[in-house]
Amino acid sequence: MRSGAKVAIVGGVFVVVASGVGYGGYNLWNGVNGGSGVGSRSGAEEKRSGPLTEDEVTGTAKEFLAAWAAGESDRAAQLTNNPVEAGPAVLDHREGAMVSKAVITPGTAVGSKVPFTVSATVTYEGRSKPWTYTSELSVVRGLTTGRPLVDWSPAVIHPKLTKGATLRTGTAKTAGIKAFDHKGVELTKETYPSLGPILDQLRQKYGESAGGQPGIETWIESGSETVPNTTLVTLAEGRPGRLETTIDAEVQAAAERAVKRYDGASVVAIKPSTGEIRAVANNRKDGFNAALEGRQAPGSTMKIVTAAMMLDQGLVDGPSSKVECPSTVDWDGRTFHNLKDFSLPSGTTLRRAFARSCNTTFIKPVKPLGDKAGTALGDTARKYFGIGLEWKTGVVSQDGSVPPSTSIETAASYIGQGKITMNALTIASITATAKNGSFKQPIIVATDLDDRETAKAERLPGSIGEALREMMRATARGEGTGAAAMASVGGDKGAKTGSAEVDEAASSNSWFAGFADDLAAAAAVESGGHGADAAGPVVASVLKAR
């Protein structure tokens, strides 16, 4: 039975009365009387202040964890700074997740944080399974009384629990799946950790149609249609359905290894001739799938699209066109610079300016467009590269955005800054489109699984497609900015480097796009510096696995 507390007024005194679910009683009592110690509800004293003592941190943590382990959700709730939300969550751990036993062991406090280990037993319809995990809590002073209290968030109960989500044990809502790559190699979270969120999404979306039968599990119910439930414990196996993906196990393994070199790294690989996603990998502490869902300025990798726009608008004739590459260029009172203010001699070619990633070359010639300057880039991105259309990859993914711009944002957009946002998926697709000559919307499972329609775009005019490939090949060789990173990659290869400044960050985000034969890849590394420094080696490692 759910227990709780409600406040009654007897003779002008607040009294805590056991009843339904009401988690305000103890805090209200202490708010009136001032509180007198960890967990105390008697005696009046002045509001406490100053840094928390070690005894206050460890004592509060131990009392909260003991109350939680004992199933005393009311008492545990009153030891937090948000008992209204904490009480139901603590109770849900026992009644929603069907925890029949719990031993919660605190670790050594580090400042105001206390790590702990939960060793629980989940029991449902005669089946029991152990459930062990770690989490942590922080202790703060209560705003009203100054008492030491647990700083409440759902992650205290489980590190993957978020606001609005709940713990449940029972017959799973969807059947499990066994996912395979396009060659029949099984894909598991254990072998390919970056695929974990994707496999969860595929299960939720396609588990039933894949022919599986649900088992009995403990899971986090997200409470959102777009966020998949997360399985925590399997008490009884169901029958998983079989689901084939477009992933290539060897390329995926290379991507997993590559991103481990850099914190905040993400990479996507695509087969240009089909749009099939061959690999998705991230290395992030927060678990966010930045490779597919990120929104960041892509820096000079966007010059692939800018070059296509300049060619399409007749601002340049081709890779051999003579262009200018001064060290700086002004646009509406703002001065844009090349890296370290380098310049190229008068009469240099577009090919060389692209290979050296000359910013001013991709800003100065666009001025004659006049009023169209703020929309031309987005029009080209949509028309030929499918950017801004609704992509249906089979899992949650974020499309790129090239919105209309004005003034200095227009100039910034040509070099991948301003309001433009991309991720590794969209830049990999842009690279694949340049290599293939036409846009193939990326997919990770076949479209006939759910009869979804993919986005369509016009084929690049032959001269533009060939020009892009020629310039990207030049970037991957000789004096091109991508030559060092791509040196170990064989075959027909091309590249584009990029770096994007983010707010006041000390170091730019590193971007790199490349292709080798029928594989294209793009990577981003947060605070990774220049494109060839961090993202370049990630892409090269993935391309070599083809």
Image (tube, rainbow, N blue to C red):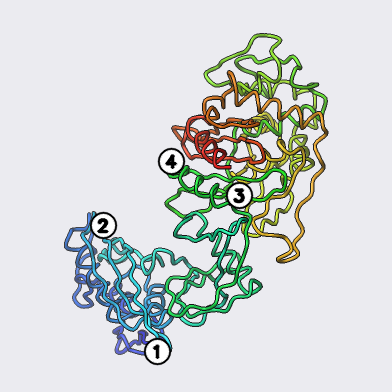
Kindly indicate the quadrant of the structure image that contains residue 319.
Answer: top right
Amino acid type of the residue tagged 4 in the rendering: Tyr
Q: Secondary structure at mark 2?
A: loop
Q: Which numbered circle lies on residue 112?
A: 2
Kindly indicate the quadrant of the structure image that contains residue 445.
Answer: bottom right
For the residues bearing labels 1 and 4, Cβ distance under 8 angstroms: no
Q: Is residue 536 above or below residue 177?
A: above
- Percent across and percent down for residue 453 are 77, 59
Amino acid type of the residue tagged 2 in the rendering: Ser
Q: Earlier in the sequence, mark 2 or mark 4?
A: 2
Write down the residue under mark 1.
Answer: 126
- Confirm whether residue 50 shows in the render: no
Q: Residue furthest left?
A: 55
Write down the residue under mark 3.
Answer: 278
Q: Does residue 151 appear to the left or right of 377 in the view shown?
A: left
Q: Secondary structure at mark 3?
A: strand
Q: Residue furthest top?
A: 346
For the residues bearing labels 3 and 4, Cβ distance under 8 angstroms: no
- Confirm whether residue 524 shows in the render: yes
Question: In front: mark 3 or mark 1?
Answer: 3
Q: Earlier in the sequence, mark 1 or mark 4?
A: 1
Amino acid type of the residue tagged 1 in the rendering: Gly
Is disc 1 surrounded by few (<14), some (14 to 19) or many (20+) residues within 10 Å? few
Write down the residue under mark 4.
Answer: 262
Is disc 4 surrounded by few (<14), some (14 to 19) or many (20+) residues within 10 Å? some
